[in-house]
Amino acid sequence: MKVALNVVGPQVQRCRNRKNWTQSILARKLQLQGWSISVGSLGKLEAQLRRVPDCELMFLAKVLGVSILDLFPKNKPLKQLGPRFQSGKRLAIFPTRAEQ
């Protein structure tokens, strides 16, 4: 089972689609704000295949015209998220090749 590395990816994709932007357009707009992100990295973010640092949330919210809170899922019980962080196996900040 694949472990999602972020919880904001689907909302980023939803916000981007509401604006009728491609990943390429969003990446370009983020780059114009000073974040050097590739289309591939944005795709991985949306697919939850990479982590999203807090500073990236600031860029995403600004460019998408939403609040940072809008990037998080609504009504997601923390009990669904908590067990994977509380288990004996801690997730690494940077996944190993076996986790990718």
Image (cartoon, helix red, strand yellow):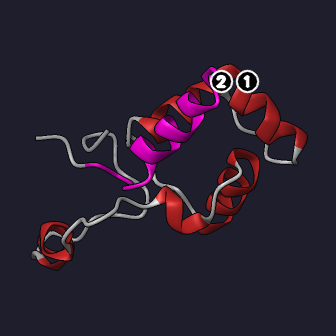
User: Which residue in the protein does label 2 denote?
Assistant: 21
Q: Which of 38 and 92 is in front in this view?
A: 38
Q: What stretch is highlighted in magenta?
A: 4-23
- Residue at 52 percent across and 43 percent down: it is 12
Q: Percent from the top left, x then y, of residue 32?
A: 89, 39
User: Which residue in the protein does label 1 denote?
Assistant: 25
- Please identify, in this view, whether the residue under mark 1 or under mark 2 is nearer the observer: 2
Q: In which quarter of the image is residue 88?
A: bottom left
Q: How many marks?
A: 2
- Residue at 34 percent across and 64 percent down: it is 92
Residue 11 position (above or below residue 69): above
Q: Which of 96 and 45 is in front in this view?
A: 45
Amino acid at the residue labelled 1: Ile
Instruction: Verify CB contact (< 8 Å) between mark 1 and mark 2.
Output: yes
Instruction: Tell me if residue 7 is in the magenta stretch.
Output: yes
Amino acid at the residue labelled 2: Trp
Q: Is residue 71 left or right of residue 62?
A: left
Q: Is residue 79 left or right of residue 47?
A: left
The quadrant of the rendering that contains the N terminus is top left
Q: Percent from the top left, x then y, of residue 20?
A: 62, 22
- Residue at 66 percent across and 56 percent down: it is 61
Q: Which residue lies furthest to the front in this view?
A: 18
Q: Percent from the top left, x then y, of residue 80?
A: 13, 67
